[in-house]
Image (cartoon, rainbow, N blue to C red):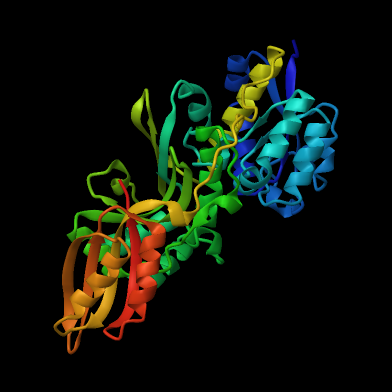
Amino acid sequence: MKKKIGVGIIGYGTVGSGVYYILTTKAHKLSMLAGVDIEVIRVAEKRPELFKGEVPAKLTTTDAYEVINHPDIDVVVEVIGGIEPAYSFIKKALENKKHVVTANKALMASRGGALLALAQSQGVDLYFEASVGGGIPIIRPLKHCLAGNTIRRVMGIVNGTTNYILTKMADENTSFESALKEAQANGFAEADPTADIEGHDAAAKIAILASIAFNSRVTVDQVYTEGITSIAYEDIAYAKEMGYAIKLLALAKEDEGGMDVRVHPAMIPAKHPLASVSGVMNAIFVEGDAVGEVMFYGPGAGKLPAASAIVGDVFEVAQNISHNKIGSMACGCFENKKLKTIDNTESRYYLRLEAVDKPGVLAKIAKVFGDRNVSLESVIQKNTSSNYAELVFGTHMVRDKNLREALKTIEKLDVVTKVCNVLRVEG
């Protein structure tokens, strides 16, 4: 049995500094619980000014390979993000037979399968709890606690930036642009918020969760993705009036037709647990055949919440090393299941159109829907002004392809001036 587990950290930004803080301030507790001392040996950061004197100079370096190749380091923590050089760093660390803990969702959602296979072949662990949900435990519960379930659905709010924006729009009747500016001013959105508001961040996370839930590899490029830039305050208001909230949902479900994995804004009933998740908080709703419905809720990002998940992985690896075993975070994608295209998915829909306000308009639109097998559940006329009116439609379950074909025809009708928005209704 080893007496000491050496840890090396690559990256000393927001999360990396949080990892160092927890590992050093909670060292005694962690060591007592793990049954082995856990000690930080090196911290690598290419911008040494970020250390701010918080890390003893003898532990710091600007060269990541001083961590990767250090003989006394057993566990490498990667918290720099992105695909490269993170992939090369992790690959080399695994080849050196070092255990790896990462928070890198983009990397795990695109090349996670190859890295997990490499870790298994080298007889080391690769853990990635912090890649989804920040401080929320979700990956280990899916792989371990819910292993006895056939998972039917995973649905969640997994991006704090977009949830903050949509919450502001709903609570303060403000526009998307104003809410985004406020999010940036408060540090909840990047100067370039594209990855968040266009849904790419959420897509990486649901690719990881779907792979675990359905035991079949899903990569981020296979996830159908829509962002929230089309959401207007009118949509928020109409949703409220109809008893719904609008959220950016990451959704994965499976039926006899295959896996359905997507990210898009959706209306969910106000009584659904996810509807009350506000601000930068995250929540992930899981449905299994044995457990029924469970929800995981908490801070989805931030220095210490993310660091908490990473340190939890380091602790788990330390226990595995001290007991001379490899953990069970190996790749569980032992099946090769069919992934549905978006055309073949089915949902209920909310539609908002602007049309000429005169007799016969509704009949023309309804005929197009009927010709494409789109069944309407409700129609409401809103905001009539001069010669125009907004029409708000609700549909029954409909195939996406049928709806899109109908809308292409409707956009060309001389009585329709604009298709304002199209949102799925879930829950």
Which residue is rendered at x = 19% and y = 89% of the image? 387
- Where is residue 346 drawn, in percent x and y? 37, 51
In which image quadrant can residue 234 be found? bottom left
Which residue is rendered at x = 77% and y = 26% of the image? 121
Which residue is rendered at x = 48% and y = 27% of the image? 141
**Looking at the image, which is closer to me, 341 or 208?**
341
185 left or right of 276?
right
- Residue furthest front as drawn: 371
382 left or right of 140?
left
In which image quadrant can residue 358 be found? bottom left
- Where is residue 316 drawn, in percent x and y? 61, 23
Which residue is rendered at x = 60% and y = 32% of the image? 333
- Where is residue 114 drawn, in percent x and y? 72, 38
**Looking at the image, which is closer to me, 27 or 398?**
398
- Residue furthest left as drawn: 359
224 left or right of 179?
right
Q: Is residue 99 visible?
A: no
- Residue furthest bottom as drawn: 386
Q: Quadrant of the N terminus?
A: top right
